[in-house]
Image (cartoon, helix red, strand yellow):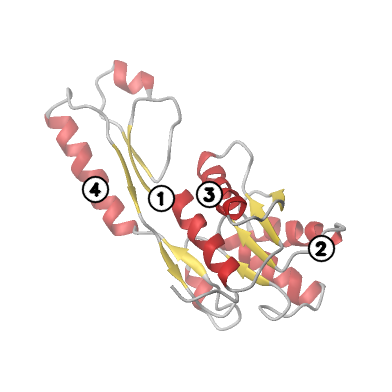
Amino acid sequence: IARCRQQGIAVVLYNRVAPGEQACSVSCDHASANRDIAERLHRGGHRRFAFIAGAADAPVSQLRLQGFVQRLGELGVGEVAVVHGDLSYRSGHACMLELLARDVAFDAVVCANDDMALGAMDAARFDKLLRVPQDISIVGFDDVAAAERPPYRLTTVRQPVEDMARTVVRLLLERIADPGLPPVVTTMPGTLIVRASAHIAAD
């Protein structure tokens, strides 16, 4: 980012954050979306939670984790079991088995993205013969195509992809025309898509 700035190249980050950088960015409000998930799961009766996160140094994944844990803390939930994966299906599968091998009870698992959520769901159902959502609720993030298919019916967050893309293009064109414009940080709300993988309270 700094090198682009030195060379007069306009930069707008799409669905990424760059802590400490003076850069334009447009992203989903990852923390707020996961605060909502925590709230809705808690109101749905869940009290023991786990989170399958991405890499510990991935800013977007950390925002999702922080929003979730922060809201649960406000609701009086003191501890959340956390494991880190690499955002892949295989990683989600392995992380769920790791969680289930721990001596920690949980009745809801939130994943940093849908691919890991699908892997986690299959690990719970087919490796450990748990029922989803009767025994354990699972929530993802992104609303990928497979999320709505009958084998999964995954509850997840849909990001405002088209609105974000339009805003990125607008900000970029504005800064190409006027390089002196200051950086702006734009966040847009995600939409919780409630399907069949979680016991979750109505909005």
**Which residue is identified by label 3?**
67
Residue at the image position 36 percent from the left and 56 percent from the top: 189
Q: CA distance from mark 4 to mark 1?
A: 14 Å
Residue at the image position 81 percent from the left and 72 percent from the top: 127
- Marks 3 and 4 in Cβ contact (< 8 Å): no
The three-letter code of the residue at mark 4 reads Thr
The three-letter code of the residue at mark 2 reads Leu
- Helix, strand or loop at mark 3: helix
- Res. 100 mark: 2
**Which residue is identified by label 1?**
29
- Marks 3 and 1 in Cβ contact (< 8 Å): no
Select label 3 or label 4 by which is in front: 3
Q: Earlier in the sequence, mark 4 or mark 2?
A: 2
Select label 2 or label 3 by which is in front: 3
Q: Does residue 112 appear to the left or right of 80 in the view shown?
A: left
- Please tell me how many numbered marks the rendered image carries: 4
Q: CA distance from mark 2 to mark 1?
A: 30 Å
Q: Position of residue 145 (x, y in %)?
A: 47, 70
In this view of the protein, which residue sits in the foreground, 76 or 148?
76
**Which residue is identified by label 4?**
167
Q: Position of residue 62 (x, y in %)?
A: 56, 43
In this view of the protein, which residue sits in the foreground, 149 or 138?
138
